[in-house]
Image (tube, grey):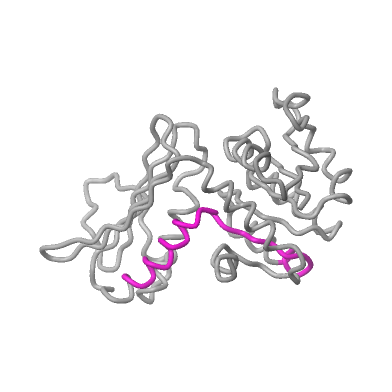
Amino acid sequence: MKIVVCGAGGRMGQAILAVAKLNKDVQVSAALECDGNEIIGTGDPLVSSICDLQKFLSKTDVLIDFTNSDAALKNLIIAEKYKVPVVVGTTGFNNDQRERIREISRNIPIVFSPNMAVGVNILFDLVKIVAKKIPHYNIEIVELHHNKKKDSPSGTAIKLAEIAATSIGKNIVDVGVYGRHSTDMVRKKDEIGVSSIRAGDIVGDHTVYFVGCGERIELTHRAHSRDSFAMGALVAAKWLIGKKFGLYDMSDVLKSV
């Protein structure tokens, strides 16, 4: 499998390149970064400018994108032109950008997931099950990441909140509360709280609390390294080859792995 990695200078880009080197079934056609990044012109494979993306898409099987929301959307538009499948692990998209991704997926297959780790995707399923069983319990989500992470809350925390809200018959737009800072923040019925911590070099922790009278359930996923995310991205890339157009997530990938 030949892949192009966009965001090669980032933490996830570096992890994917490292894992790909250990996988004999994977060949990196190109590693790309935005102009001005000091990593361009270095590394093995040599990192090129993302402006050269079109030159590499004709000789690759899958594009893997871990950049930022604006750059990722531009890359998807180019991939659509060349009919190249895309794995999108980038987070921080707004609603308009998400809708544009859905439109592009009508022409190419896309795996779009805020978290590629197998364990996190199992956590998604567990949250759905527990929330449906005890919809009257208070639900709180706490996520921890390193101090360089740009988006807050994390894409994984947002998805956990969306899953929990849907499972209790609510829309997260109506019940989501992101951080609490006020003299009048008494918890409202069905409220789902999301809190973010940014510190040190934390790879990524997510805990969903279901709290009732006299007891609580805590569902936690802790990432020890980015390798689990990187390996998940490669599994998703392999899975995409030969798939018809459409918008998929990691739950679709894991059904057949």
**Who's the residue at 42% across and 65% down the image?**
172
**Left-right relation of 243 to 139:** right
Image quarter of residue 67: top right
Q: Residue furthest front?
A: 24
Residue 124, above or below 115: below
Give the magenta range: 103-130
Residue 21 horizontal/vertical position (percent): 68, 39
**Who's the residue at 24% across and 53% down the image?**
185
Residue 180 horizontal/vertical position (percent): 30, 48
Residue 1 horizontal/vertical position (percent): 76, 53
**Left-right relation of 204 to 11:** left
Is 100 part of what is drawn in magenta? Answer: no
Foreground pick, 183 / 8: 8
Image quarter of residue 53: top right
**Left-right relation of 110 to 216:** right
The C terminus: image quadrant: bottom right
Residue 136 horizontal/vertical position (percent): 24, 72
Is 120 part of what is drawn in magenta? Answer: yes
Residue 76, above or below 196: below
Residue 186, above or below 52: below
Residue 68, above or below 48: below
Please indicate, yes or no, whether residue 86 appears anywhere in the rendered image: yes
**Who's the residue at 47% across and 54% down the image?**
156
Please indicate, yes or no, whether residue 67 appears anywhere in the rendered image: no
**Who's the residue at 26% across and 57% down the image?**
218
**Left-right relation of 186 to 98:** left
Tell how many labels: 0
